[in-house]
Amino acid sequence: MSAMLRALWNYRGFILGSVKREFQSKYRNSLLGAAWTVLNPLAMILVYTVIFAEVMRARLPGVDNGFAYSIYLCAGLLTWGLFAEIIGRGQNVFLENANLLKKLSFPRMCLPVVIILSALLNFAIVFGLFTVFLLVSSNFPGDAFLAMLPLLAILVLFSIGLGITLGVLNVFFRDIGQFFGIFITFWFWLTPIVYPVSALSDGIRDAMVWNPMAALMEGFQQIFIANRWPQWENLWPITLLALFLCVTGLGLFRRHVGEMVDEL
Amino acid sequence: MGSISVSNLGKAYKQYPTRWSRLLEWITPGHKPHHTLRWVLQDVSFSVEPGESVGIVGVNGAGKSTLLKMITGTTQPTTGGVHVNGRIAALLELGMGFHPDFTGRQNVFMAGQLQGLTVRQLMELMPEIERFADIGDYIDQPVRVFSSGMQVRLAFAVATALRPDILIVDEALAVGDAAFQRKCFRRIEEFRAQGTTLLFVSHDVDCVKKLCSKALFLKDGCVAAFGVAKTVCDMYEKALFGGLEGISAGVDIDARLLEPLVDESLMSNCEVAYGDGRAVIEAIWLENERGERANVFGSRGLLVLKYRVRFNEAVGRIAFAFMAKTRDGVALFGMDTSHMPEINGRAFALGDIFIARFELENAFAPGVYYINCGIRDDSADPPVFLHRRVDSVLFRVKSDELTFVKSGVINTVAAFELASA
């Protein structure tokens, strides 16, 4: 483990360089450049807000604030976006970098780290804008905002653990990637992000115990809607699951890294 | 620093009969194997001392690249192990990992960082890299507008920016132009002089002999020979042009190689043959002026090409032909019998067997040459081949005291005089 960390540290130049290049390459040949990083999620938020808040007249029960629903939506959508980006890129990380893996010798763990960092960078940009909006509209949650850090840590751990596990499996069974694309759509709509958990019937609400992301999303939403610190006891399952997935992912990776290069 | 030791190295790829077999293997308790192994490299052992230069020769698919990949660490061995001491720079598939949308300079940084260099080191090395690659303003253009030669130049410049302890060179250099190749070899020589260990893969046997003190000959994934470069290269060529009978790992080969090569199996494995089948060229071989079969000749002297023909139908108006070519397919000398009325007018009957004999002066420069033979029906328009065998015999001309040529493909007796005027 320490050898792995040391190798990663030695390759920090490559990791940071890759993050930078990835960011640049995405917008290299576009006129608006990095503005697209912001425009995409902004459009998505606009669509959801217009449809749910204006067209369908959805209101958050018990909250009397014109922006409440938009804030609720952003708290869930932006963090889910981070989750989905890490997983989506994680499951293809080895396939996409097949050329590098086959021809060059370097610490393979650099690749997931690059994914985490560039996803966090994209997240930081959009989330920074969101924070500015909160400050300007005087909806800033105060010191509960600090709870973002542990929650984000759990989110990143969970998504990269799942991402690497899927990434290794995806090399050998390409169905995994296809399947997970469908799966994550269902997962999104089965998690209270666009709708409040109170909109669910009792039976389904009880079933949310089995959705590890539900508790995490609730944590994020609580911060911004109720300015409340998360209820930590609800977060144990996903934290343990995240650790378990990381260990599984690393184990799978170690056991199959040689075979993986042969398979690519 | 710079030593390599390879012991009992083996590489096998798993093959699954169906796509479901792997899943079955993963999920059944006890992981009962459902695959078969296909070995591409088996039981390879050798060691390289610091500062040594070792050439690796073998036909395509002999396992050279797999071996190199395991030494550099990209592929993991199935059995055995590799111990490498020191920093490796591998010139395998130069330009891999260049991102087409980024400029040459940005790609230099990326490639350098992949080798574990820091940005500061790269900044210091940048002027030297630019100077060596010598691609001018292109360095600040996106790599997608580079020619493939420019990519190789830049990649070579980055990969060798710092002197490595071990340098691994695959046939990557073949891409650049002659001047750049010369430059690359000069750099390789410099590194070698400073103590870098060199592993060099090439199909150019002369190059291996020139550059390397030792050589490793891989055949079908096994070590066929390991030892003095010249000896091993000669064995490789012999195996390439003839058979491999009697060659066993590295023992008792020197005496045999001093003899002229008189292999029975002179067939190359790159032969192409076609024809309408009215006649068959059953055998083709070369003889030296003493009438002995050979495929290695000294300079000058006589070359005798013979082939045996069996006629499956009665035919008339045919020509016997042959052609000698270089490896690149440049035709050097071809002739046929269409101008000889005694051959041209002759009729052949079903079942006739003849031996055609061409005798020519050996004016070929040292190197390897390929021979085509054919029997052509000139009465048809256009003429058709009864049987034609392309690249069916290879021969090699060695350099000796009758070699006058310094460059080119023709060796003729030449003299030089310098008189004061």
Image (cartoon, coloured by chain):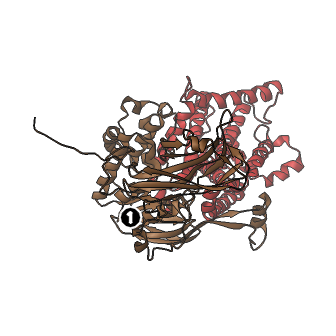
Image chain in brown: B
Q: How crowded is mark 1: few (under 14 residues within 10 Å), some or many (20 or more)?
A: some
Tell me where residue B270 appears, x and y as whole percent.
58, 53
Query: Chain letter of disc 1?
Result: B
Q: Is residue B254 left or right of residue B144?
A: left
Q: For residue B210, which quarter of the picture?
A: bottom left
| Tag count | 1
The kind of residue on which mark 1 rests is Lys
| Camera sees residue B419 | yes
Q: Measuring 44% from the left and 73% from the top, which residue is drawn there?
A: B253
Residue A180, above or below B49: above
Report the side of B212 relative to A240 (left or right).
Answer: left
Residue A82 locus on image (x, y percent): 64, 42
- Placement of A132 over or under B170, stated as above or below: above
Is residue B119 visible in the rendered structure shown here? no
**Residue that mark 1 sits on:** B230
Give the x, y percent position of residue A251.
63, 64
- Residue most toward the left? B420
Q: What element carries label 1?
A: helix
Q: Where is residue B324 in the image (x, y as percent from the top left)?
A: 50, 47
Q: Colour of chain A?
A: red
Tell me where residue B306 sits by quadrant: bottom right
Q: Find the residue positioned furthest to the bottom.
A: B252
Q: Which of A150 and A34 is in front in this view?
A: A34
Q: Quadrant of residue A67?
A: top right
Height in image: B11 above or below B162?
below
